[in-house]
Every structure is written in C-alpha cells, then in structure tokens.
Amino acid sequence: MNKNSSKKTPPVAASDVGRAAFCPHFLELKQQGHTPSKQAQYLMKQGSQAHADFNQSITRAKSKDKRCYIASYLYGIDDPRTESLRQFRDKKLLPHKAGRFFVSAYYRTSPFIITLAQKSSMINKLLNTAINGFMTKIKDLNNNKNKGDS
Amino acid sequence: MTFFDVVESMALQSYIMYIITIIAIVIYIFLLRGTPVKRPRLVWVDKSRKTKAFRNKAYGVSGKPDCIYKLADGYRLVEFKSRKSGIYESDRVQAKAAALAARGGSKYKITEILIQTKSTEELIPLNMSDEQLYQDIKYYIELAQKAHQGEPLKAIPEKRKCKYCAYVKVCTEKAC
C-alpha cells in the first residue's frame, strides 16, 4: 500500500484512473493542457446532460412511492383514483404514528388480499365496493375542504 | 329464551368473531409473513457538480459515483455511462477506484458495483478488502499519479479508442 506516498501527492480522481486504463498518454496530453477536440467537447456536454437526467430520474423515483397495491390492482397503477389514494396516504396517514402502522400493515396484508381477490369473485366484488366507498369518502372530504378554502 | 337473549348472544358471537379476526390478522402480519424482503434503498446520489467527491486519503483516490444503494448486506455503487455500446475495462477500473474512494471516505462500505450503459449492465461483486481492491487497480492509480507529476506516459493505440479520443489531433502515437 502506498499510504505514505499518497499523503504527499493529492488524490487522483477515479475518472483519471479509468482514463489511465483507456490510454495513459491521454492523461499526459490532458496534463499538458491541450484543448479537447470540438467533437469530444460536444460529447462531454451530452454525457454530462445524460448523467444529470439519470440522477434526476432516480431521485424522482425515490421521492415518489408508487406502492398502493389494492388500488393499483383495481384501477391501474397510474389511474387518477390510485394517485388520490396515494396522496391520502402521504398527507393524512403517514404524518401520524397510527397511520404509519396502518400503512405498514396494509403493505404486508394487501398482496395476500389481492391473491384472494384474484381467486374469488365475491371477495373481488367486496373489495371493489369497499375501495369505491372509500374513494367517495375521500372525494367528499376533498370537496368539503375546497369549499372551505374558497 | 327471550328475543333480547337471542340478540345478546348474536352480538356476543359477532364480538368473538371480531376478536378472532383481529388476532388472526395480527398473527398473519407478525408471525406468518415474517420480515419482508428489503429492497435496495437509495442512500446517496450525485446531484450536481457541487456534490462533494469521496476521498480515500489512505490510498490517494477520490471519486464521485452516480449513486449508492443500501442493500440487505452492504452497499451497491452505480456507475452510469451515457453511451449505447458495451462496458470496457476502463469503466470497471473507474468504478473500482470510485468504490475505493467511497469505502475510505464515507460510511458506505461498497460490496458490489453496477455499471450501466444505455444497452447493457454488469454487476461486479467486491468481496475483498480495501487493500485487495487497491492492489487490483494499483497499476492504473500509479499511472494517474505519474501523469499528475508530469511524467511521460506511453499510449495504447487502438483504432476504436483513438476514434473517440479527445486529443487525437495532437497525439503523435495514434493508431489511425
């Protein structure tokens, strides 16, 4: 290990270590201060943009929890009704301890309930009625809130 | 038996059924289902140019991966390449250097590397110590250090490489 020598020299960037594997002479030319070709500059710009897009997409995916099994099963993953249930979860349930417990219990049981609903049309019907009723309640709540706001 | 007795017994029955259902649900949640499988969780992401790079002072390497995920038994470093073509040795070396930097400069003890391009991906397990990882890429780290010190370095001319090299116009050792 070069612990002692590395203390004297500044750390090398991982990208430069990769470039050393690509072509060591590249690093020498870079160190000498040569300007990269216009095509390379264009490609670097595109690469930076692609990286930014990639990082943004994973950050966005992290901030948005798309789980909502039963509603996704009944309505579809991107249905507005599923989205309103997700909003209800994030705004009304998750801020409270009891709500978080409920959500956690829901995530654990819902795959099992969906399996049951797939096997039994009666349970499917019951589930549909229950979730539709719940949706109506949420809609009423939202409408009342909107009226209150206006 | 009066009407009220019947009603009372029915209420009691439904109450008992209610209790049994609750107990069954609790048993199902906490005992039968066990602990759910943990999905990889994003713990670090390179948000912008201003994001600070990891620095491993012991091995003299710094690096900024694209993101790090927490796994059930370690951390996964992700290195994204915007090109459509495959993964090259230089990508593996760069990712390993970034892993070494993250291991020494943060709490993230990287246990695997995922390199992604637009068309393919490769998972590299890192079941090795920092020292072994360093030895694996030592040659390239030393080359990069030599370049920083202004030492002349030999080219590895290949048509494929030279075609996309940023310094092909000023290079005297190019393949084409």
Image (tube, coloured by chain):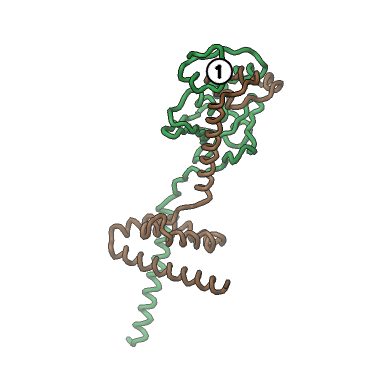
Chain colours: A brown, B green
Looking at the rendered structure, the number of numbered marks drawn on it comes to 1
Q: Residue A115 or A150: which is nearer the viewer? A: A150
In the displayed orientation, state which residue is furthest to the right.
A8
Look at the picture and state if B5 lies above or below B59: below
Q: Residue at x 50, y 26 (%)?
A: B91
Compared with A58, A130 (above or below) is below
Residue at the spot x=64%, y=16% of the render? B146
Taking the image as shown, residue A106 lies to the left or right of residue B132, namely left
**What residue is shown at x 43% (from left), y 67% (from top)?**
A135
The percent position of residue B90, horizontal first and vertical second, equals 51, 23
Residue B44 sits above or below residue A87 on the image: above
Farthest bottom residue in view: B2
Q: How far across and how far down the image is residue B121, in percent?
A: 43, 32
Secondary structure, mark 1, is loop
Q: Is residue A15 above or below residue B27?
A: above
Which residue, as the protein is rendered here, is positioned at the far front?
Answer: A38
- Which residue in the structure is indicated by mark 1? B169
Q: Residue at x 29, y 65 (%)?
A: A122
The residue closer to the viewer here, B20 or A123, is: A123
**Where does the image place residue A13, in percent across and percent down from the top left?**
61, 27
Residue A71 locus on image (x, y percent):
40, 59
Q: Residues within 10 Å of mark 1 (few under 14, many from 20)?
A: few
- Work out whether residue B137 can be spotted: yes
Left or right: where does residue A1 sit relative to residue A70? right
- What kind of residue is marked 1? Lys
User: Image quadrant for the N terminus of chain B?
Assistant: bottom left
Where is residue A4, by image quadrant? top right
Chain of the residue under label 1: B
Q: Nearer the viewer, residue B47 or B40?
A: B47
Q: Is residue B139 visible?
A: no
Viewer-proximal residue, B144 or B112?
B144
